[in-house]
Amino acid sequence: MTSPGRTGVYVCHCGTNIASTVDIAGVAEFARRLDGVAIVRDHKFLCSDSGQKLIQEDIKRLGLTHIVGAACSPLMHEVTFRQVCQAAGLNPFSFQMANIRERVSWVTQDGRQATQKSKSVIAAAVRRVRHHRPLIARQVPITPAVLVVGGGIAGIEGALRLANAGKQVILVEREPSIGGHVAMLDRTFPTLDCAACILVPRMVEVARHPEITLLSYSQVESVSGFVGNFRAQLRQKARYVNEALCNGCGICVEACPWDDIPSEFNQEMGKRSAIYFPYSQAVPYLPLIDASHCAYFQRGTCKACQKACPTGAIDFEQQDQFQEFEVGAIILATGFQLFDPSRAIQYGYGRWDNVLTSLQFERLCHPSGPTGGKVVMKDGREPGSIAILHCIGSRDENFNRHCSRICCMASLKFARMVKEQTPARVFEFYVDMRAFGKGYEEFYEQVQRAGVIFVHGKGAEVIRQRDKLLVKAEDTLLGRQVIVPVDMVILAAGLEPHQDAAEVAHLFGIGCTEEGFFMERHPKLAPFETAVEGVFIAGACQGPKDIPDSVAQGAAAAASALALIDKGVVDVEPIAAVVNPILCSDCWLCVNECPHQALSRVAFQERMVACINEAMCQGCGTCVVTCPAGAISQPGYTNEQLLAEIEGLLVGET
């Protein structure tokens, strides 16, 4: 039977986070009666310097062999208290966290129930910790390369920061060109400077940087490995254009007879050919063939582009290419998608002409857009009045409850741009004006002085009456309903996660919030880290952001990845599974089930047995539960430890 040793139990008040619900004195008195407990103390803030010193002194003075910290989640401070144990000469894995904050006080309103549950959790930790054995963390070398997924403004910033520090970067973008949504913008708030002037030089720098491997029109197929040693398989989709031979002359595009396809980049307001450049400033500047509209792929005829190409770059036989890269860290900067206003049928988007989304209006204003930058209606006339409706698909219980943050300022920018270009009257229908950033409030005041009419009330409906669009709303300042006839309506559509955000999160092993954005490790202390060590997030994939915040988070994620890589080695938890070759029956079940390909077969005493590669093992436990012979165990999660923990829970309930 395992000796209980000398266990110290330390109960944290966490200010009032725990103490307001849990009877700390009662819990401490209960812990003193548990077998093997040598001392029990409570502290206002156990993670503070004084709390850590208290534990260190007790370990040295009382000869404690195990420590239980009844406090917050292991995610927050398990590493902190392990370091405390190590500093006092105790093996860091002699510590066990008992989470009585997130799992008890924060989710239990009844104080009596919270106190009883805390006793059970502490009893389980005390029973479990006596079975802990000294473990030594493994150190594995880090691959000095970073995979950046997403070529928008955040991904570009992160890639350049890392590349300029001398690190190899693989930048993957699933669209044919990098640039993201910023490439579609005309001007940026609050300075109204040219979006292309900000973005394009950075895009070109990415393409030319010797440390950056740019893979556009590509996607990540699979990811395996662990922090410092990830392996990613990438699919580069066929453009049907030989990149090495193409000189970007555009003759193939001009020769294509199929030129009536709605342009995705121009938000389907302009047309493109079946072979096309993504846009005039695309990086890389290469055409691609849309096989779904190409006559050759659909009917086996045409080949006009191939006949016209002077360099022979058109290759209808081109196939998707697969490449595998090993990297030490990953930055996800996959961005957002715009809310589709056709889901909110009351606004008439898709039914009435001249009802536009915010991105469509951006393209309308852009010099390279479908109208050459002129603000005109579908029939070519200049609008005499324009309504801008805020919070379409945002702050709405029917669609997205979150605020999209950029809509207010984008709407003010639209009003300012309209006033500069036309004599049209502009109406802004808003719920709350959220001008939160540097220079934003001043910009709001400028727009007010420009003569824009602000209606404090969300646009409720847009209907068509003869040649006018009627915007219905309740003006909360006037206390009555208003109906405003206009020629054009701009819907400030909200930002939401990509439709496949959950699939991408699953691919990289991270989580999503209730809204569907990627989950950060901590909303305040680690907004660009994830629960998977070595995987970072940046930009609007984590939540709605404007350009400055996206750039800042891209740089912060790069700094974290750089700090990780520059260490050269990474400490890996010593939880790699272990095979007892004597018990192994060589059934192959564990080899086939391992999601990380960490198991193989080796010779042992004239027979083949399973063997685990510690560097690849993630400690997921799949092989442990799969093995029918019980030949595989996992340090830190042995049967003795888990059964003792269950017994402790039952003791605490009585």
Image (cartoon, grey):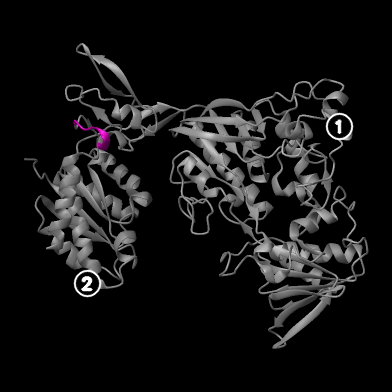
Which residue is rendered at x = 9% and y = 59% of the image?
33
Q: Find residue 397 and report its horizontal and vertical position in percent.
A: 56, 70
Residue at image x 88%, y 25%?
308
642 horizontally vs 196: left or right? left
Which quadrant of the view contains residue 556? top right
Q: Give the labeled residue for mark 2.
A: 112
Q: Residue at x 29, y 22 (%)?
A: 611
Residue 224 location in percent, x, y? Answer: 45, 32
Specify whether 86 is left or right of 437.
left
Residue 518 spot, x, y in % from top left: 52, 50
Mark 2: which secondary structure? helix
Residue 125 is covered by the magenta coloring: no
Q: Where, quadrant-wise, is the N terminus in this rendering?
A: top left
- Reading the image, the residue beneath label 1 is 250
Q: Which residues are magenta?
A: 625-629
In front of the other: label 2 or label 1?
Answer: 1
Quadrant hosting residue 642:
top left
Asked if 520 appears above or below 44 in the picture, the reply is above
